[in-house]
Image (cartoon, helix red, strand yellow):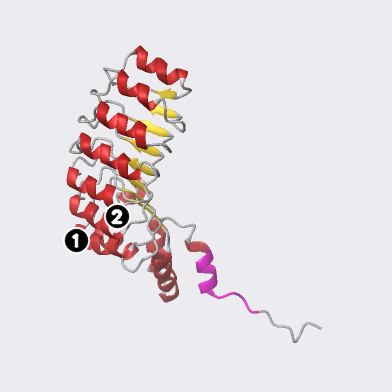
Amino acid sequence: MYEDETYTYPSIHFWLHLVVKHLSLRDLFNLRAVCHESYIVVTEYFRYMSDLDLSIVSERNRLTWEHFHLLTNYNCSFRRINLSNICCLNEILFHEILARQTRLRSIDLSCAYKVTNETINCLATNCTLVERLILRYCHWLSDESFRLITDRLEHLVELDVTCCWNIEDQSVQMLFVKRGSTLKHVCLSKLYSLSDWSIRSIATYGNRLSYLDISHCWRVTDHSIEALCKIGQLQQISISNCSLITIVGRRHLIDSGIQILS
């Protein structure tokens, strides 16, 4: 009774599509070299993937610029990019990649020592929908590029410029004048120019701020901390190694229900 019935098995193309999203980068590049079908599927996957995370040490240590180029060359769909500690960037070609990422929402370039201000300028010019920008320990970031970030990235929600020493106090003030209505999570740790003037700007314009890190900002005093307590949304603050913030400033924060992080 089953003699006339036939069953068509799914193609290898079908099975590969199910598998690729679960593979590591190393396995993806190995699979790409297996056969023509796998080459097509992996190349297509690279073209349309929305997340690129190269922060994993085991993957990053094996990555070359050629690999990075294969991953990104035809992609216009990235929403999240994490290149923290990346060391294989060709900056000129990276600019071409960034110029296509008009949908980008999050990028992490922490400790990316091969990157320069030209990359930040390209990012701010082309990727204007970015909501999350992480530049921890990017000592090379200039005050001019930081101002461009402030001017162009209108949707910023999270910003981390820890240890970006070149940022001036006035530029932080301007950041909150222009973007205080969107910013919720901000790290300004080890910005040694940061003063009470900036903190007052944060208190005045940062009405959506829920987290603030100003640790190691030794110019900040109790006077501006009292103003910060008026931000209704502020839930957590880091003030470690702020030598001019005394028990008085801490008491203001505690009485306002703001958690002090160590």
Residue at the image position 52 percent from the left and 73 percent from the top: 12
Residue placed at 42% from the left, 62% from the top? 49
The boundaries of the magenta stretch are 8-18
Of mark 1 and mark 2, the one earlier in the sequence is 2
Please state which of residues 167 and 47 is positioned toward the viewer in this rendering: 167
Residue 76 part of the magenta segment: no
Looking at the rendered structure, the secondary structure element under dot 1 is: helix
Could one spot residue 246 in this view of the protein? yes
Above or below: residue 123 compared with residue 242: below
Magenta segment, prevailing SS (helix, strand or loop): helix
The amino acid type found where label 2 is placed reads Leu
Quadrant in which the C terminus appears: top left
Q: Residue at x 36, y 21 (%)?
A: 226
The percent coordinates of residue 109 (x first, y second) are 29, 47
Left or right of residue 170: residue 128:
right
- In the picture of the structure, the residue carrying the numbered disc 2 is 63
How far across and down, in percent of the image, does residue 122 sit? 24, 57
| Quadrant of residue 78 within the rendered picture | bottom left
Question: Which residue is the site of mark 1?
Answer: 92
Which numbered disc, 1 or 2, marks the residue closer to the eye?
A: 1
User: Between marks 1 and 2, how big is the CA–CA gap?
Assistant: 18 Å
Residue 13: in magenta span: yes
Q: From the viewer's perspective, is 235 left or right of 148?
A: right
- SS type, badge 2: loop
State the quadrant of the N terminus. bottom right
